[in-house]
C-alpha cells in the first residue's frame, strides 16, 4: 500500500510553541512552588526549591545535601519530590510529542492536552491521597497499606544526608569488586 504524498508532507509544517510562553510558564511554576513548598514543608527553605528549578533543566535529577539536623531528611524528600514531578512531567510530555508526531497529530493539541491532564492531576491526586489518608491506616506496618516505597525513599534520603557510613559494612567494597 502506497502512502499519498500529501500525507508524507503533513509533518513538514511545524507548529512551534513560543519560547517566551514556555519560559514564562516554567518561571511561573517555579515561583508558585518556591512560595508554596516551604509552607507545606517548613524545613525546606525557599532557596532550595528555587535551586532545584534552576538545576532541573540541566541535570534532570536532584541530590539534596541538607544536614540531618532540623528536618534535613524531610527537606531532602520534599526536594526529591519536586524534582521527580518535574522530570516525570517532562518525560511524559516528550513521549506524548513523539506519539503525536508518529500519529500526525497537532503539537498544539498535544501540548494543551498535557496542560489539562496535569491540571486535573493537581486536583485529583491530592484528593485521592486525602481520601486514603482519612479512611484507611496508611503507612502502618501492620495495616493493608504499608507504603513500602515510603520506607525505601526514607532510607535513600538518610543515606544522602548521612553518607556512606550508613551502609552495611563492606558494602562499597563488594560493589566495587
Image: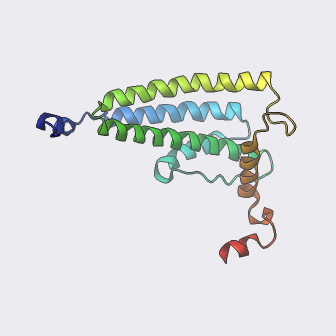
Nearer to the camera, 69 or 156: 156
Q: Is residue 134 visible?
A: yes
Nearer to the camera, 110 or 87: 110
Residue at the image point whose x is 15% and y is 40% from the top: 2
Residue at the image point whose x is 40% and y is 37% from the top: 96
- Determine the image quadrant of residue 38: top right
Nearer to the camera, 2 or 91: 2
Residue at the image point whose x is 78% and y is 73% from the top: 170
- Determine the image quadrant of residue 128: top right
Q: In this rendering, is residue 54 above or below 127?
A: below
Q: Is residue 2 left or right of residue 21?
A: left
Residue sticking out furthest to the bottom? 177
Q: Is residue 99 left or right of residue 173?
A: left
Please state, as top left, top right, bottom left or bottom right, where the C terminus lies in the image.
bottom right
Q: In this rendering, is residue 47 above or below 121?
A: below
Residue sticking out furthest to the left? 5
Please state, as top left, top right, bottom left or bottom right, where the N terminus lies in the image.
top left
The x, y position of residue 140, in whole percent, is: 84, 36
The x, y position of residue 91, in whole percent, is: 47, 43
Residue at the image point whose x is 80% and y is 25% from the top: 136
| Chosen colour scheme | rainbow
The x, y position of residue 80, in whole percent, is: 63, 45
Q: Is residue 82 left or right of residue 87?
A: right
Q: Is residue 7 left or right of residue 171?
A: left
Q: In this rendering, is residue 98 above or below 62?
A: above
Nearer to the camera, 118 or 30: 118
- Determine the image quadrant of residue 94: top left
The x, y position of residue 129, in whole percent, is: 69, 27
Numbered label tally: 0
Residue sticking out furthest to the right? 142
Residue sticking out furthest to the front? 1
Q: Is residue 72 visible?
A: no
Amino acid at each position: 500500500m502506497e502512502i499519498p504524498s500529501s500525507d508524507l508532507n503533513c509533518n513538514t509544517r511545524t507548529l512551534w510553541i513560543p519560547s517566551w510562553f514556555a519560559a514564562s510558564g516554567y518561571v511561573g511554576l517555579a515561583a508558585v512552588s518556591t512560595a508554596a513548598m516551604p509552607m507545606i514543608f517548613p524545613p525546606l527553605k525557599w532557596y532550595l526549591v528555587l535551586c532545584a528549578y534552576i538545576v532541573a533543566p540541566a541535570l534532570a535529577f536532584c541530590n539534596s545535601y541538607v544536614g540531618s539536623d532540623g528536618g534535613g531528611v524531610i527537606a531532602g524528600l520534599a526536594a526529591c519530590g519536586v524534582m521527580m514531578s518535574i522530570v516525570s512531567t517532562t518525560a511524559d510530555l516528550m513521549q506524548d510529542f513523539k506519539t503525536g508526531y508518529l500519529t500526525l497529530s497537532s503539537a498544539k493539541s498535544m501540548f494543551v492536552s498535557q496542560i489539562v491532564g496535569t491540571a486535573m492531576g493537581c486536583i485529583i491526586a491530592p484528593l485521592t491521597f486525602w481520601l486514603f489518608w482519612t479512611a484507611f491506616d496508611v503507612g502502618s506496618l501492620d495495616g493493608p497499606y504499608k507504603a513500602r516505597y515510603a520506607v525505601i525513599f526514607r532510607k535513600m534520603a538518610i543515606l544522602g544526608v548521612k553518607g556512606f557510613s550508613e551502609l552495611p559494612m563492606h558494602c562499597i567494597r563488594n560493589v566495587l569488586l
